[in-house]
Image (tube, rainbow, N blue to C red):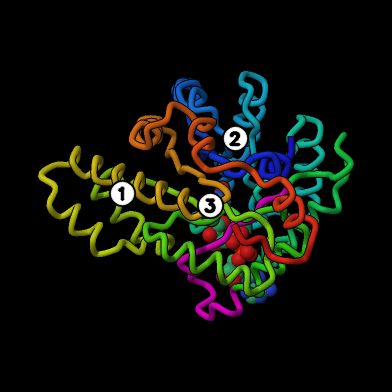
Amino acid sequence: MHIQDILRAHRTTFSFEFFPPKSQEGFDELFGTIARLQELKPSFVSVTYGAGGGTREKTHDLIVRIQRETDLTAVSHLTCVNHSEAELVAIFDRYAASGIENVLALRGDPPRTLLDYDPKNDAFAYAAGLVKFIRSRTNLPDARGFGIGVAGFPEGHPSTPNRLEEMDHLKAKIDAGADYICTQLFFENRDFYDFRERCELAGIGVPIIAGIMPISSRSGMTRMAGLALGARFPARLLKAVDRCADEESVNRVGIHWATEQCRDLLDNGVRGIHFYTLNRSDATRQIYQNLGVKDSAALRAGCGPIDRLQLETAWSSEKPFIP
Ligand code: FAD
């Protein structure tokens, strides 16, 4: 099933992200996590792709195993960095043969560990080129081809300081055929609402799914800050972490903060929440518990009825969808 069909059918989606473990042991452990998270009835799950190349095969293997062993709809992340057009053609032929229908089309970051990496060999310099390429692939039972999501950055992407230009680049991905946007994690909901409004101003009408990741440790926060992506920690959150006596308390503060973010997003008509699980189930399950629900269906029930007409109109018209 295409993610856009799920987004059409549900007022709000709830999805979980995993990364492919390196070892067989890690794979088996992850399947325990996926089994526990399946009880929360996610709308779909997604699996990340290593732009550097080390775990690329494993993304495909994990997606295929999820499809074979669970009832979950899975989205494969794919980066165009370090891929020639011939490689991308082979990847999509394989996806079609494996029944993979949904892709999150990304540029990826130039791999620092590959010393001989030369961007001139890449088929596409930006994700918009990859989206256009995927749209041209129609070797699937579904005549629409692949379902395509793209990344969005509520705090801005570091390579494009000009935020107006950044929206033009995001719009190019939608114009090339992307169905929805999934955002980078953020800790301040105002950044998300501002991003959503800027999308609306830019004429971007596709659903926007909010990326949420609870902090779990001080070292994790330091790592995120170093990545310079999705790392604007509000002073209130920093103060709350500062007060913590130990790492267990930091974890609790992180889950509480993420719960409050989710509650506020749901109250403000978010189209979807994507949990960066880091291959663990505890934090996500705890957030559901804190919200007082046993699964995504119960969470969705509290989001109000679906206005089918509004959803359909928003999808088919040029007008942006205002939740
Ligand atoms: P693009 O949309 O290509 O944008 C990259 C930068 O280039 C932006 O600053 C943009 O404004 C600029 N730009 C775009 N077009 C042009 C143009 N024509 N001229 C000049 N500048 C332009 N990374 C992975 O390696 N693997 C993953 O699995 C993965 N999953 C992710 C999932 C989500 C939900 C998100 C938000 C990010 C993920 N990333 C992943 C990280 C992502 O690959 C990087 O953040 C990357 O730097 C940006 O990718 P993009 O697809 O947004 O690229």
- Write down the residue under mark 2: 43
- Which numbered mark, 3 or 1, is in the foreground of this view? 3
- Please give the label number shown on residue 270: 3
**108 and 15: which is toward the camera:** 15
Packing grade of label 1 (10 A; few <14, some 14-19, many >=20) is: many
Quadrant containing the N terminus is top right
Helix, strand or loop at mark 1: helix
Residue at image coords 75%, 42%: 91
In the rendered image, the residue lying farthest to the left is 245
Question: What residue is shown at x 69% (from left), y 67% (from top)?
Answer: 120
The residue tagged with tag 3: helix, strand or loop? loop
Segment tinted magenta in the rendering: 148-166
Image coordinates of residue 35 in percent, x first then y, are: 50, 21
Residue drawn where x is 18% and y is 41% of the image? 249
- Mark with earlier residue (3, 1): 1
Q: Is residue 206 left or right of residue 158?
A: right
Mark 3–mark 2 distance (CA, rounded to whole Å): 14 Å
Q: Which residue is mark 1?
A: 257
> Based on the displayed image, in which of its 4 quarters is residue 133 positioned?
bottom right
